[in-house]
Image (cartoon, helix red, strand yellow):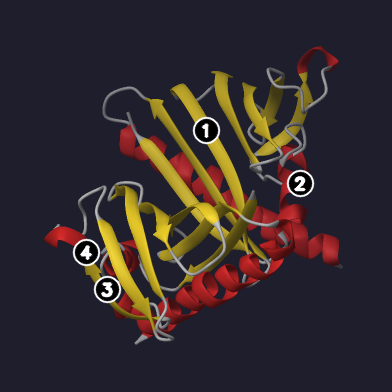
Amino acid sequence: MARVYISSVIDAPVARVWERVRDFNGLPRWLPLVRESRIENGEPSDRVGCVRDFRLQNGDRLREQLLALSDYDYFCTYSILESPMPLTAYVATLRLTPITDGDRTFAEWTAEFDCAEELAEALMTNIGQNVFQAGFTALKRQMVA
Amino acid sequence: MPRVVRSTVIAAPVETLWSILRDFNGHDQWHPAVAESAIERGLPSDRVGCVRRFRLADGSELRERLLTLSDADMAFSYCLLDTPIPLLNYVAHVRLAPVTDSDEAFWHWESRFDTPKGREAELARLVGDEIYSGGFNAIRAHLAERAR
């Protein structure tokens, strides 16, 4: 079982950051890697169990299912159903926590998955840096703007 | 039942902060409200269930029991047993997490408690500002002192 953990401080109130990231169909609006997204079967994007089908800038296609969404605890958990990455049992959680000191946001993004041992490090780096850290870096920039 | 939450970011690696906070008997070393601390019956301070006795800066005493200690999650919980301040059913949780992209530490401190009617806001402010935010500032000073 490989595990990725990336965290960051975003200089904006948690409600503002949450408004941006809670839309399970909204990745193209803030994650630079993602070109387009839709929810299957025309379901609302905050219906737990819904599936997003999205494409990256490089053409790769992924399908992910929403497993949990909390407007109270500010977190979202999802799993990968289909992806070009050689991994299985992928479950990730994006969680926000208010930093009362300065009215900022502590953002944590974790993922766990199974894969061949020799691929683990490359996958962890790719997911951690190119997706999670890139997402936080983009949010920091967008929240200042 | 008031709930008090304070959180901050400390400019130090999370392991450094945890090494200070995990000592349930060490808070007199850094927190300005605590003059003296001792663990009852000579138990080690990382033994879950141990009771610490504080003498506060104003001379009054309080006792707190360690309910949870997790090195895996860098977290601990404790409750008040005896207190000069009317905080009833007081349970507090401390949690640390690394800020991986800046090598700093996120520190979350929260509690719930009952109080006599009408004193909720006053006591919530006391706990949040004097104890928790005061603790954050004291740790910053403590770390700066150690670095010298």
With B90 as the anchor, is B119 left or right in this view? left
Helix or strand or loop: what does disc 1 sit on? strand
* Disc 4 + disc 3, Cβ < 8 Å: yes
Q: Check the image and name the residue furthest to the top.
A: B41
Mark 1 — residue?
Answer: B92
Q: Circle 2 — which element?
A: helix
Residue type beneath disc 2: Ile
Name which of mark 2 and mark 1 comes first in the sequence.
Answer: 2
Q: Is residue B94 above or below residue A120?
A: above
Left or right: B47 as drawn, with respect to B6: right
Q: Position of residue A56 (x, y in %)?
A: 39, 80
Res A98 label = none
- What amino acid type is highlighted by mark number 4? Ile
Query: Circle 3 is placed at which residue position?
Result: A37
- Please, what secondary structure does the residue beneath circle 3 have? strand
Per the image, label 4 sits on a secondary structure element best described as: strand
Residue assigned mark 4: A39
Can you see residue A67?
A: yes
Q: Is residue B88 above or below residue A141?
A: above
**Residue topped by disc 2:** B20
